[in-house]
């Protein structure tokens, strides 16, 4: 039998995590309505139906709340994308699963993605530099793609190309779709996904001797 204080602690942790997620969800809605600059803690608290003090209890300030908003979306995206990639057999199918699941996630979470883009473009660190838009951050994002393509080349599934440059091109196609889906309510993500998969299927494939 588990100690009673452990059960109470777990319940408290669960409740606190649920409250943090509620606050982040409200931040997403407020940013979608008024933009990052006008998304004050007071507005977010009002949207969530709580006091500003409750937000201050869970987050040190607006910057930390915005950081956690971005991190939570990346975690949620990873939880959606990783199983799809892992279930695919071979590097070729893993690459297509990576592209397809990324675009599917964006299509299903447009408001959240729109808020994330607004935060990433505006949030700054103590030196005034973008908090998330860094070379280190980009490398962390594209590394799984680089690994897939290097393994595919090693196994002979892919042709000869620079995996890092190809990974950046793929991420540009995915991130560009996010912006387009947010701007254009009639954007057909399913058709776009099929097109991008075909495009990079050809780009990463082996070329014939006459090519």
Image (cartoon, rainbow, N blue to C red):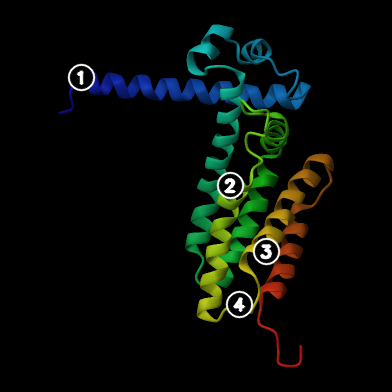
Residue shown at the point (79%, 52%) measured from the top left: 188
Mark 2 or mark 4, which is nearer the start of the sequence?
A: 2
Q: How far apart are marks 4 and 1 (CA)?
A: 56 Å
Q: Distance between the residues labelled 2 and 3?
A: 15 Å
Q: What element carries label 4?
A: loop
Mark 3 or mark 4, which is nearer the start of the sequence?
A: 4
Contact between marks 3 and 1 (CB within 8 A): the answer is no
Q: Which quadrant is home to the C terminus? A: bottom right
Q: Where is residue 36 in the image (x, y as percent from the top left)?
A: 73, 24
Q: Is mark 3 on a helix, strand or loop?
A: helix
List the single residue furthest toward the bottom: 210
Q: Distance between the residues labelled 4 and 2?
A: 26 Å
Tag 3 residue:
165
Tag 1 residue:
4
Q: Where is residue 187 in the image (x, y as percent from the top left)?
A: 82, 48
Q: What element carries label 1?
A: helix
Residue shown at the point (37%, 23%) measured from the top left: 13
* Neighbour tally class for label 1: few under 14, some 14-19, many 20 plus, Cα within 10 Å: few
Contact between marks 4 and 3 (CB within 8 A): the answer is no
Mark 1 or mark 3, which is nearer the start of the sequence?
A: 1
Tag 2 residue:
136
């Amino acid at each position: 039998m588990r100690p009673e204080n452990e059960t109470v602690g777990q319940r408290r942790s669960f409740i606190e995590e649920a409250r943090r997620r509620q606050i982040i969800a409200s931040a997403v809605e407020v940013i979608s309505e008024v933009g990052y600059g006008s998304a004050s803690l007071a507005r977010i608290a009002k949207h969530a139906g709580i006091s500003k003090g409750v937000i201050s209890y869970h987050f040190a300030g607006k910057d930390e709340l915005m950081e956690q908003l971005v991190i939570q979306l990346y975690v949620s995206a990873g939880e959606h994308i990783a199983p799809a990639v892992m279930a695919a057999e071979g590097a070729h199918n893993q690459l297509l699963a990576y592209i397809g699941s990324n675009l599917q996630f964006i299509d299903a979470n447009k408001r959240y993605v729109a808020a994330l883009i607004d935060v990433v473009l505006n949030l700054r660190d103590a030196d005034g530099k973008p908090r998330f838009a860094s070379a280190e951050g980009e490398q962390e994002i594209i590394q799984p793609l680089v690994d897939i393509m290097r393994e595919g080349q090693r196994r002979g599934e892919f042709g000869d190309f620079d995996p890092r440059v190809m990974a950046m091109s793929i991420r540009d196609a995915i991130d560009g779709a996010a912006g387009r889906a947010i701007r254009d309510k009639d954007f057909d993500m399913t058709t776009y996904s099929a097109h991008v998969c075909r495009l990079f299927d050809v780009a990463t494939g082996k070329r014939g001797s006459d090519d």
